[in-house]
Image (tube, rainbow, N blue to C red):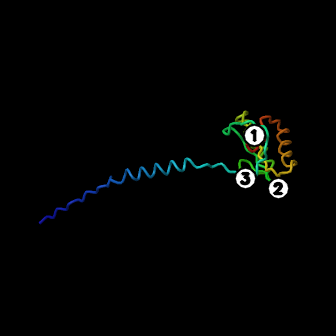
Amino acid sequence: MRLVRQRKQFVIPLNSMSDVAFLLLIFIMLVSLMNYRREVKIEYPEATAAKKTSAEKNLEIWVDRAGALYLDGLPSDVKTIENSIIDTYQAAPDTRIHIIADRETPFEYVNRVLQMLQILQYRVVSLVVKDP
């Protein structure tokens, strides 16, 4: 007597596929909306007149009260900032450099950054202040 073995058919349930796709879409949308800009906590100085610049093409140099330098929110030293400015200028000469300093920062620390930019002959520089 010969036994016939029946093969079980494997079925993938498709009822929940739309739910999984919807959750995946929500996850991708939330991750893409995250702001990856790093900031240093400072108090912005105030100005009576200010000019708005675009926030897309810029390189941010932060100076805190102790004189520590940050490049786009990451701790850096003067040499690293110089090399980054040179690389940025070679890639896109119209890139604006924003100097962001705390209200209580002594001017000698900001002047150190300005002298570095003067030596590099970089002319597209902005000092960031608080909106009046």
Q: Which amino acid does label 3 sit on?
A: Val
Question: Which percent across, then down, holds residue 115?
Answer: 86, 42
Q: Is mark 2 on a helix, strand or loop?
A: loop
Q: Which amino acid does label 1 sit on?
A: Ile
Q: How far apart are marks 1 and 3 (CA)?
A: 16 Å
Q: Which amino acid does label 2 sit on?
A: Ala
Residue occupying image coordinates x 85% and y 49% = 109
Question: Which percent across, then down, holds residue 80?
Answer: 77, 48
Q: Judge from the rendering whether residue 107 lies leftward or rightward of residue 10; answer left or right.
A: right
Q: Name the residue under label 1.
A: 97
Residue occupying image coordinates x 73% and y 44% = 60
Q: Mark 3 points at which residue?
A: 40
Q: In which quarter of the image is the C terminus?
A: top right
Q: What is the crowding at mark 2: few (fewer than 14 residues within 10 Å), some, or many (at least 20)? A: few
Q: Distance between the residues labelled 2 and 3?
A: 13 Å
Residue occupying image coordinates x 80% and y 36% = 122
Q: Which badge, 1 or 3, is on the more N-terminal residue?
A: 3
Q: Which badge, 2 or 3, is on the more N-terminal residue?
A: 3
Q: Quadrant of the N terminus?
A: bottom left
Q: Mark 2 points at which residue?
A: 66
Question: Which percent across, then down, holds residue 104?
Answer: 82, 52
